Structures are given as C-alpha cells and as structure tokens.
Image: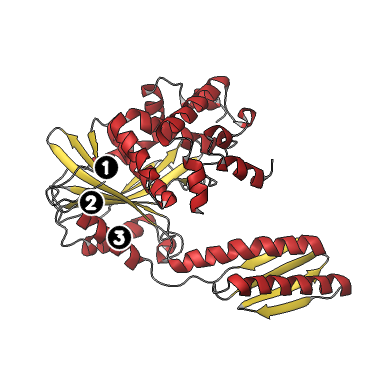
Amino acid sequence: MEMADELMQLRLGSWTAWAGDRSSWPVTTPGAAAVEWAIDVHREFFGDGLLGRMLDDGPPHPFVDPLRWPLSSVHAIVELLSRACALRVIPRDVGLAIAGSTTTADVNRRVTSDLHVLEVAGLAVRHGWSIDYEAALSTGRRPDLRLVLGNSDIRVEVTSSGPDRQRLAAEALSGSLVPALMMIGVQHEVEISGSAASSEVDGDDLARLVREVEAAASESAASGEVRTLAAHGVELSIRPGGSGLGSFDGPPLTGDMWPRLKNRLRTKAAQTEGAGAAWICVQDRSGLFQLTDLAGVDEHEQLRRLAENVSFALRDARHVAGVLLSTGVRIDAGEDDHDTILADDDGRLAGSRVLRRRLPGGRCRRTFVVRLRNGPAADDGPMHWFRREGSWLDWALAAAGLPTVESIFGSGQ
C-alpha cells in the first residue's frame, strides 16, 4: 500500500487502520493479542477521532513518525505497548485527563507534550508514588504532576525543547525541495546535486525554482552535458545518466540553542512556584547534544557544562530540586549505549548523574540528572524512576496481566 493510501485511511480516524495488517507485526501469537489489547486501550482513552484531527493539524504527527509507526517494526510496537501500559497502571482518572486534553486546539503539540507527561507518570507509579494531574498550588499554578510518597510531596513539570525557527525552516525547505529534485532526476534520468545557502525559499519562488530545475534537467538529458543552476540561494549541478538525487546539503544552522532552553527552564520553574519541592523534566528535540559544542566532549564534560548552566539559570528558583534533561527515546546506536551510570568524579556536582539506558525494542535514552545545590533537600525520585526504566515495560506488562517482552517478540529479539 502506498503511503498516500495509508494516510487516507488514517484520516478516517480508525486505530485499526493505523495499526495496519496484523500479519506485518513482528510478534508471536501471544504478542499479537497484546498488540490488539494495546490498540483497544488507545481507542478507549484517545477516541477514534484523534488521528484525523492530528492529520488535519499538520505535521509533525506524534503517532506517525519513524519511532512510533508503522507497526511493522519492533520499536514501534514497544512504543505502543509502553503507552498503553502507562495508561493502565496510572489512576484511570489521571489517564483520562491526560488523554482528554488532546481535544483542544493545536492538537499535535498537545499530544507530544502529554505523551511525555504520561511516560513520567507511568515510571513514578512503579515506585509507589500516588499521582494527581495538574493539581493547583496555593499560587494558582498547576504543574503537570503532583506526586506523593510518604512524607515526600513533589511537583513535576514536563516539557520538551524543540527546534528553533531557523531549523524548522531548514527542515521545511529540505522536505519540499528534496522530493521534487528526486522526482525530476528519475523522470529525466539525471543526477541532481547541490546545496541551499538559506531557507528563505518558499511559495512562488520555490515553484519557480522547481520549474527551472526541470527545464535544466531536460536540457542536460537531451544534450548529454552537465548543467549548473544558481537561483534563489540554491546551487545545483545536473549530470546526465543518473537516476535521481545525488548529495544535497540543506541550509547551515547557526546560533546558540542554550538561551531557548534557559528560557524554557525559567518558565517551568515559575509554573511550579509555591511548591515545597519541584523537578523539571525536559526532553530535548532541538539537537542540543548533536548540533552544539556538547557533541565534541565526553559525557562527564557535558554533565559539568549542563549543571553549571542550569544552576545559574535557576539560581533564584530555590524550590526546584533538580532538572532531568533527556535526549528522548531513540533507536539504539549500539556499543556506546551501555546500561551504565556516570557520576561526577570530583564531587563538585553532588547528586548529578548521567543515565545511559538500553530500552526494550532496540531503543535507548540518555538522561542527564542535574541536582541543584541551592534546591530543597527533596526526594530524588525522578532520578530513580529513570534509572530503572530499562525494566519498566516488563513490570508494566505484568501489572496489566500480559506476557513479557521476550514472549511478545520471541527469544530472537
């Protein structure tokens, strides 16, 4: 089935259509029953209309990305099971409140945010914490979660740090131009390579550029000569005898990503004002660890730099006990993602850690835990939740009366 046809079925708002052909699921017979159960849980909590609203809202679509879809991949099924299990193990009223918020406008942004909240809530329940969703503080603020265990009462604000406008514009240009260049190359049997100096090409200029490329490709194919084209900040080389797109470099990304994250942290600290103790959980989607100078240093140095910056940014937020900054769940890159914990060597960052965790289904996550020196002497619960997340899914499956991960996928996974 072509992608366009699959997306059309998604517009019908059916979780059954989203799940695809059962025969494509890489699971055992007991595993297929578990997947059917998980789909039913999504239908129960999110409703059948969510997928259509997400598509109408425009990209990015939280349930239609390479990590979560289609269900022909192991990691997509593990993501599905993890969401369903979290909805089952947390209090039902909390699950309904989280899922129900997706009826608001800007649905894709809200779904992305609430999936992070759901994940943190599911991890906390395993450790015995009771949960309230958006319980009001005396200040009138409503942090995402209130978590209570014995004498410990903490508020948790969950957020993500996404790409800035420059990166979004660059991705939008590449997403529009690259498929067009590939199609022209295939149609005219030429290879098109080049680069874009800026992302300020859209609308009529982009359509005009595509027409110019098509004309140059036709000339190159007819004459057997290489053609070059420079227009609208894009430089291209068109070589006859190819079969589509060669190399294409998108617009360069510049600028400092830290100010955006700093502002996000301060906003979330303000959201928890009035709490005796608070934690802020951030999933980074901005490329902070891949596209800045953090990419060139080891994890001890990454932790040190993050701790210094976070501590300075939140120096006046004395109620914030710590910050968890996560790379987010990603496909396991292999040997560098061992199941390890890296602590501070010289004691300057007491309580701060780097958690490298392998997760079921060929996934992994790195989480930097920054314990603030000026913060309250609060429970380190969030660090312990993420520390044990590698075994969380098997625990949650058992709590839901389902087989283990190994039984679902077979011993080969």
Give the Cα separation between the discs numbered 2 and 3: 14 Å
x then y, percent, for residue 54: 48, 47
Give the answer, above or below, for where 409 lies relative to 74: above
> Which numbered disc, 2 or 3, marks the residue closer to the eye?
3
In the picture, residue 404 is in which quadrant? Answer: top left
> Which numbered disc, 3 or 1, marks the residue closer to the eye?
3
x then y, percent, for residue 124: 28, 36
| Amino acid carrying mark 1 in the image | Pro
x then y, percent, for residue 348: 21, 57
Q: Quadrant of the N terminus?
A: top right
Q: Earlier in the sequence, mark 3 or mark 1?
A: 3
| Amino acid carrying mark 3 in the image | Arg
Q: Quadrant of the C terminus?
A: top right
Is there any visible trace of residue 242 in the rendered image? no
Q: Please report the residue visible at 62 percent of the width from the left and 73 percent of the height from the top.
A: 204
For label 3, the crowd category at 10 Å Cα-Cα, with few meaning under 14, some 14 to 19 and many 20 or more, is some
Q: Secondary structure at mark 2?
A: strand
For label 1, the crowd category at 10 Å Cα-Cα, with few meaning under 14, some 14 to 19 and many 20 or more, is many
Q: Secondary structure at mark 1?
A: helix
In the picture, residue 27 is in which quadrant? Answer: top right
Q: Please report the residue visible at 36 percent of the width from the left and 28 percent of the height from the top.
A: 88
- What residue is pinned by disc 2? 322
Q: Are marks 2 and 1 in contact (CB under 8 Å)?
A: yes
- What residue is pinned by disc 3? 264
Is there any visible trace of residue 408 in the rendered image? yes
Q: Are marks 3 and 1 in contact (CB under 8 Å)?
A: no
For residue 382, which numbered disc appears in the image? 1
Q: Is residue 153 left or right of residue 334?
A: left
